[in-house]
Amino acid sequence: RTPMSIYLTFALSLFAFTAALSTRLLVTLLALGQGATAATVGLLASVLAICPLVLSIPVGFMADRFGGRWLLFASALLTSAGVLVPVFVPGIEALYATALLAGLGFSFNTVVLQNLVGVQSKPGERTRNFSNYSLITASCLLFAPVLTGAFVDLAGGSAACLYVLSLNAINMLLLLVLGGGLPKGRGKPKEAEKSEGVTRSEEHTSELQSRL
């Protein structure tokens, strides 16, 4: 039986990736709207990418040790803080703070969500669950730019920022209310190794007793 928490993971993926892709485009549109050069837009894109590049491996270790719930909550919180910066602080310089905070938030999404899908999938379900996960991310790639561009055109940049904020708020609410059902981390590596060593020792003792 498929655990209900896998459907929660899919819902979290939908809102997280829609928010992330919307933020990427939003930073570009806000910069161009303020007269940024192509070089500035490229630099902003690089700032968005630097944290996921540097932090992917450490985040993987953190996901194994602590689980994904609070890492995803931190991701939504950081991205929310990033998109609020241009609402209160106009100017191209403020977009660098947005890119840095949002990029830091993006660092958690892909690694943690893929880890959750894998951990919750039985061998016979793994292909199906990852296919569903891929369909969700592909749908986000299709719809997030359209929604973001529509908000910027029809309501302005601040409204588009609040739209991204609402996506993150939904994820934070889901994590607070239902996130307890997500898989927990493995704890400290030393404790896990110690527990495994005790188990092996007990098995060895039982084997010796059976021989006697």
Image (cartoon, rainbow, N blue to C red):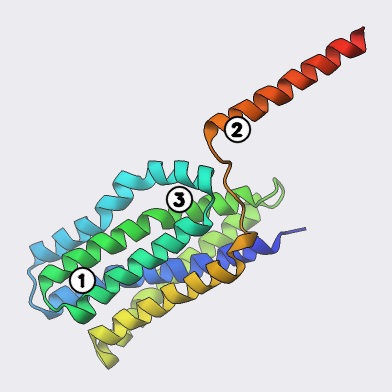
Examine the rendered structure and indicate whether residue 159 appears above or below residue 79.
Answer: below
Image-quadrant location for residue 179:
bottom right
SS label for mark 2: helix
Image-quadrant location for residue 43:
bottom left
Examine the rendered structure and indicate whether residue 46 appears above or below residue 135.
Answer: above
Frontmost of labels 1 and 3 is: 3
Do labels 2 and 3 touch, CB within 8 Å? no
Q: Is residue 146 visible in this depiction of the protein?
A: no
Label ID, residue 28: 1
Going from the N terminus, do you reach mark 2 or mark 1 first? 1
CA–CA distance between discs 2 and 1?
45 Å
Q: Residue placed at 24% from the left, 84% from the top? A: 157
Q: Nearer the viewer, residue 64 or 33?
A: 64
Label ID, residue 111: 3
Q: Residue placed at 41% from the left, 66% from the top? A: 76
Label ID, residue 163: none
Categorize mark 1 by other alpha carbons within 10 Å: few (<14), some (14-19), many (20+): some
Q: Position of residue 200 (x, y in %)?
A: 72, 21
Quadrant where the N terminus sits is bottom right
Categorize mark 3 by other alpha carbons within 10 Å: few (<14), some (14-19), many (20+): many
SS label for mark 3: helix
Name the residue furthest top.
Answer: 212
Going from the N terminus, do you reach mark 1 or mark 3 first? 1
SS label for mark 1: helix
CA–CA distance between discs 2 and 3?
22 Å
- Residue at mark 2: 192
Q: Position of residue 131 (x, y in %)?
A: 58, 58
Categorize mark 2 by other alpha carbons within 10 Å: few (<14), some (14-19), many (20+): few
- Residue 177 shown left or right of residue 202 in the figure: left
Examine the rendered structure and indicate whether residue 167 appears above or below residue 59.
Answer: below
Do labels 1 and 3 touch, CB within 8 Å? no
